Amino acid sequence: MSPSSQAQKHVVIIGAGPGGLAAAMILGARGYRVTVYEKESALGGRNAEVVLDGKYRFDLGPTFLMMKYLLDELFTECGRDIRDYLDCRRLDPMYRLIFDAKEMLVTEDRERMKLEIEKHFPGEGPALDKFHERESKRFERLYPCLQRDYGRLSQFFSTTLLKAFPHLAAGKSLYDVLGEYFRSEELRLAFTFQSKYLGMSPWDCPGLFAMIPYTEHAHGIYHVMGGLNKITDALATVAKEFGAQIHTERPVKRVRLEGQRAVGVELADGESVDADAVFVNADFGHAMEHLFPRERIKKYAPEKLKTLNYSCSTFMMYLGLDRTYPDCEHHMIVFAKDYQKNLEDISHRKVASEDVSVYVRNSVTLDPGCAPEGHSALYVLCPVPNNTSGIDWATEKAVYRERILKILEERSPYKNVRQHIRSELILTPDDWQNKRSVFLGATFNMGHNISQMLYRRPHNEFEEISDCYLVGGGTHPGSGLPTIFESARISANLLCERDGITFPKAKEFSELRL
C-alpha cells in the first residue's frame, strides 16, 4: 500500500521530546497525518534548550551525541540530508577525565590513545587493541537487536538475538568486562563511566553495555552547533515539511479509550481529538500515573510502578560566567575520590554523598554563540539518588551547590569559578519530578538491568492498550538519544506493519556510513 492512500490516517503524539519528534518526522514522511501536543512552551522535552538572561544558552539534558550514523540514516530514510539541517562537529579530544591523583585526555585516535594510556598506566596501552577487536564483534552482533521490537516472547528465539547471546556477557557487570582488558581501576573507570548515560553504576550495569564505550572510541562523539537541542528543532522542521502540526502549551489530560483501545486524546482545555493511533512520548512512569484510567492499567498500575527499578537522578547547575576557560576541553569529568562508594550511595544506600562526581561541558570552546563574547555557559551535572531516597532537596540544594563549586575550584581547571557567576539555574530531583514530569526524578528513566530489557521492558506497541505506541527512554531499546531515536523508528514500523504501509528496512551494520 502506498503512503498516499493512507493520508487520512491520523496519529496523535503526546510530547515533543526527541522520540516524539523523530516519530513525527518518520510517520509524516510515510504519509500519515500527524499532530503533536507538547505541554511546555518549547520543544525538546529533556532535550530542550535553557536560556538564562536571554544570552547564556545550554542544553537542558543530553550533551553527548553518539552513534550519529543512526540519526543520519533516519534523515536519509525521509529523503533528507542531515547536513542541510544540522552542523555536527566531531570532537577530538572527546573529553578529559580527572581522577584523584592523575588525569587523562581521551581521544578516538587509537594510536594516540594507546600513548595516553601508556603515559599514565604503563604496560596497559596494548590492551586497547584487544578491547577494539573483541568489542567490535559484540557491537556488530548486538546492534541489530536494538533495531527490532520484542513485543512477543517468541522474539527471544529470533535468529538475531540467538546470534547475539554469546556476546551478552551474561552474569558480568560492565566493570567486570573492562577488567578483562585493563588492570588499573582508574583505567577501567575511564571505559565504564559511560554507564551513567543509563543512570547506572558500572558495578551494576550489564556487561553487554561495553558496546557504549566501544562506539565512542570507534565511531566518535559529536557536538551539534547551537546545542544538541537543535536536533529536536531539525526533527520538527522536517516533520512540518511533511505536514505535521506541532502544538506547544497544549497539555494532554488523558488518552481516550474505547475498551482497551486508544481512540484519541482529551486535552487539558477540554478539547477532544480523534486518532487512529496514539504515540506516547511522555515520561513512562508519569504517563502511567496520569494519562490512563487507573482501572484500565494492570501491569503498570501506579501501585506497581514503584516496585520497578529506576535510574539515578541528576543535580544540575547551568552557570553563565563573565569569563572564559579556553584551555578547558568541551567535556570534562571529575571522579569522586571513592567512585564506587559514591555510586553505592546513589544507587543502593540512596543517601547524599559528601564525595561526588561532577561532569562539566564548556560549550564556548567550540561553540562561542552559546554565550556573549568573553563569557561562558557552563553545564554542570552531578549524579544523585532519585526520589525514592527521601532526601530533602530544599535543604540539600545549597549544600550540593557549595560542594560542587568547591570540587571545580580545587580539583579542576575552573579556578575561582564562583566569583564569575552572573546567571545561574539549579535543578534538583524534585524539580525534575515536579516541574518536568519525570517520574521519581529518574532522569534516565527505568533502569537497564537485565530484568527490564527487551521483552521485559514496556513494549513499543504498548501491551496494555491497543493502537497505542511508546517512544522514548521508557521503552525498548532504552534511554540515550540514539536508542530513543531507534524507539521512534521501531514504533513507527509497527504501526506501518499494522496499516500495510511499506517502509525501508534499517541498514545492516555493514551498510552503515560510520
Image (cartoon, rainbow, N blue to C red):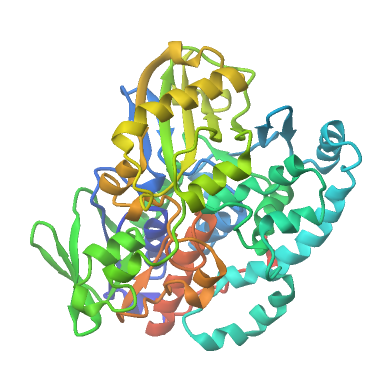
Task: State the residue at coordinates (83%, 48%).
Answer: 128
Task: State the residue at coordinates (33%, 62%).
Answer: 285
Q: Is residue 427 above or below residue 160?
A: above
Quadrant of the rendered image containing residue 286: bottom left
Task: State the residue at coordinates (65%, 34%).
Answer: 95
Q: Nearer the viewer, residue 347 or 327?
A: 347
Is residue 369 visible to us here? no
Q: Nearer the viewer, residue 488 or 334?
A: 334
The x and y percentages for residue 37 are: 24, 57
Quadrant of the rendered image containing residue 179: bottom right
272 to the left or right of 73: left
Pick the quarter of the image with the N terminus: bottom left
Task: State the residue at coordinates (51%, 40%).
Answer: 63
Q: Nearer the viewer, residue 252 or 165?
A: 165
Q: Is residue 404 above or below residue 274?
A: above
Is residue 346 visible to us here? yes
267 to the left or right of 145: left
The x and y percentages for residue 514 are: 69, 54
Q: Residue furthest left?
A: 270
Q: Is residue 391 above or below residue 271?
A: above
The x and y percentages for residue 351 are: 44, 44
Quadrant of the rendered image containing residue 507: bottom right
